[in-house]
Amino acid sequence: MSRVVVTGAAGKLGRAVTADLRAHGWDVLPVDRAAGPGAPEGLLEVDLTDQAQVVEVVAGRTDERGGRVDAVAHLAAVPAPGRVPNSATFANNMTASWNVQTAARAAGVRHVVWASSETVLGLPFDEPPPYAPVDEAYRARPGSTYSLVKTLEEEMAHHLCRWDPELTMVGLRFSNVMEPHDYAEFPSFDADPMRRKWNLWGYIDARDGAQAVRRGLELDRPGAHVAIIAAADTVMTRSSASLMAEVFPGVEVRGDLGEHETLLGIGTARELLGYEPQHSWRDEV
């Protein structure tokens, strides 16, 4: 049984990841700053901005919670722009990621997955995307302090893997994470296509996000990798082609779009990780 530390385990995605990994035979040590409602069993309260605490946890030296750690899934962060002042977002998220990624390397942990973000693609797309579906091929275009940190995390992973060629690090550019109870609101999005244009009408079911994390942890391909993680469809009942034609008429659409095909391209995730979304809001509403 492989042992994995999951940070941000009390959050929406973290809860799903912890449950999925445990269901697939992983020994999970869930950690978060505080145990909120629905927090996973056995959660260890850790301040990830305190390097000493992070090193202790990743090295497996916490009393009664110790043991060799084989992998880390780093999901913890101030989760979006505007939740706290920009300086606090930067200080928390950048410091936590530095502490987690370097502690893993120091402890000899060779598999790290972390939550990057769709925001590095240029959200909220006030400036139109260069083409659609968007993918990982164009340079990151952060538009907020939160997104800037995510971009810096990707760059940091690249260099850590350059320094240590045995590391496999996977940054997952998650779309807007949803749980089944969130889908009741989706039919209302049709009234105004501008309401969700900010992320090209994308989303990700938390259960599929968990699948992506698990597949990232299983990847044994040294180096730093990034992949967009989204549902296979959009939040709209209108066709993806009609949405692009109305809202982004000057943007090149590459390839033939399916009726509701995601405009957040998941081809890399499919090819690199074997990721395939299993859940759609259309099955829940």
Image (spheres, rainbow, N blue to C red):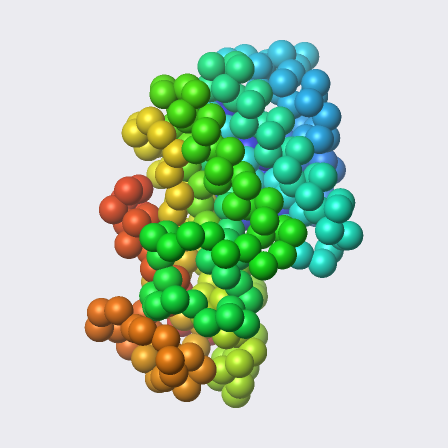
Quadrant hosting residue 212: top left
Residue shown at 38%/83% (left/top)?
Answer: 249
Q: Is residue 190 left or right of residue 165?
A: right
Q: Position of residue 154 (x, y in %)?
A: 48, 40
Residue 279: tell me if it is visible: no
Total residue callouts: 0
Q: Nearer the viewer, residue 229 or 253?
A: 253
Residue shown at 50%/61% (left/top)?
Answer: 122
Query: Up-down: is 226 above or below 133?
Result: above
Q: Position of residue 41 (x, y in %)?
A: 62, 34
Q: Position of residue 133 (x, y in %)?
A: 34, 66
Residue shown at 33%/27% (left/top)?
Answer: 222
Q: Is residue 180 left or right of residue 213?
A: right
Q: Nearer the viewer, residue 224 or 57?
A: 224
Residue 159: tell me if it is visible: yes
In which quadrant of the rendered image does the N terminus lie? Answer: top left
Query: Up-down: is 154 above or below 103?
Result: below
Quadrant hosting residue 169: top left
Q: Position of residue 36 (x, y in %)?
A: 72, 44
